Amino acid sequence: MSSTPPYETQFPSLNMSNVIPSAFEGVWKPTLDKWGQAMKNAVEGVAEMTALGLGLDQRTFIDAGLYGPHLLAPTASDLNKYGKKDTILAGFHSDLNFLTIHGRSRYPGLHIWARNSGKRIAVKVPPGRYLLVQAGKQLEHITGGLIKAGFHEVVVNEATTQVIEKTRSQGTRPLIRISSTFFWHLSSDYDLEPIQSLQSLAAEVRQQAGEEEVQTYEKMKVGTQVQN
């Protein structure tokens, strides 16, 4: 999913070649490349729209992530073993990359925290051609905290158990929850620092909201931010 930079990266361990399982050698790469490229195209469209919405050049973020170590990373949870209500499938966290994009899982369970209320919300993605996008730490850093990385978790809830029971009664599909997730990164060697205009706007937003805590975002390489 990544383009090779025309320079030697300072972070080779973050930009390694993909490992292809030998048992799936014939189908692995073409299948995942096709889906991964579709996800990459979609999330880069979001990155362009985000830049325009913030008053920046359309390619600001695209150029910053031209050589990013983007990652298609599906995860699977066996709901035969971990299908009990309130079982944690992915603990409370935020993502360290720039933007994360998801396809719709057949089994609900994703929860997010709203910045304006702090409330935990169960995510509902309707059937059809819909994708969910979340902000990561790199986007938070470059906007000086104007856009915050979203906290989220995946927990078996009532809606999950209902789908489990329906699927079990039909007996047509395995009880495996797949999260088809693509992590879009800025280039590892990119100098990550807040854009001044956005940092100033972030300070205004915090003041209006009465937020006292001030987060500092030091200049660093993206690779250093990932390693930290």
Image (spheres, helix red, strand yellow):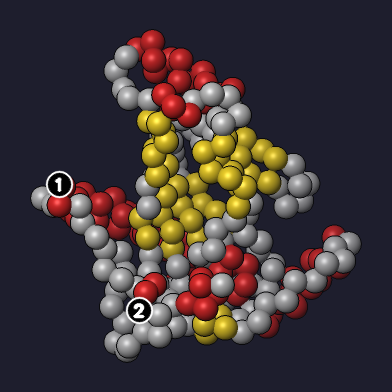
Residue 206 vs residue 59, the one in the foreground: 206
The secondary structure type at the circle numbered 2 is helix
- The amino acid pointed to by label 2 is Pro
Residue that mark 2 sits on: 12
Residue 77 vs residue 58, the one in the foreground: 77
Point 43% across, 59% down: residue: 183
Residue placed farthest to the bottom in the image? 7
Q: CA distance from mark 1 to mark 2?
A: 27 Å
Residue that mark 1 sits on: 23
Point 24% across, 56% down: residue: 33
Residue 222 coordinates in the image, percent (x, y): 50, 77
Q: Is residue 202 above or below residue 172?
A: below
Residue 223 coordinates in the image, percent (x, y): 48, 77
Point 75% across, 71% down: residue: 215
Q: Tag 2: Cα neighbours inside 10 Å, few (<14), some, or many (≥20)?
A: few
Residue 93 coordinates in the image, percent (x, y): 60, 52
- The amino acid pointed to by label 1 is Ala
Residue placed farthest to the front in the image? 81
Q: Is residue 170 above or below residue 30?
A: above
Does the image show residue 124?
no
Point 89% across, 62% down: residue: 210
Which quadrant is the N terminus positioned in? bottom left
The secondary structure type at the circle numbered 1 is helix
Q: Is residue 53 rendered to the left or right of residue 70?
A: right
Q: Is residue 72 above or below residue 54?
A: above
Query: Which image quarter: residue 12?
Result: bottom left
Q: Is residue 143 rendered to the left or right of residue 58?
A: right
Query: Which image quarter: residue 201?
Result: bottom right
Q: Tag 1: Cα neighbours inside 10 Å, few (<14), some, or many (≥20)?
A: few
Does the image show residue 187?
yes
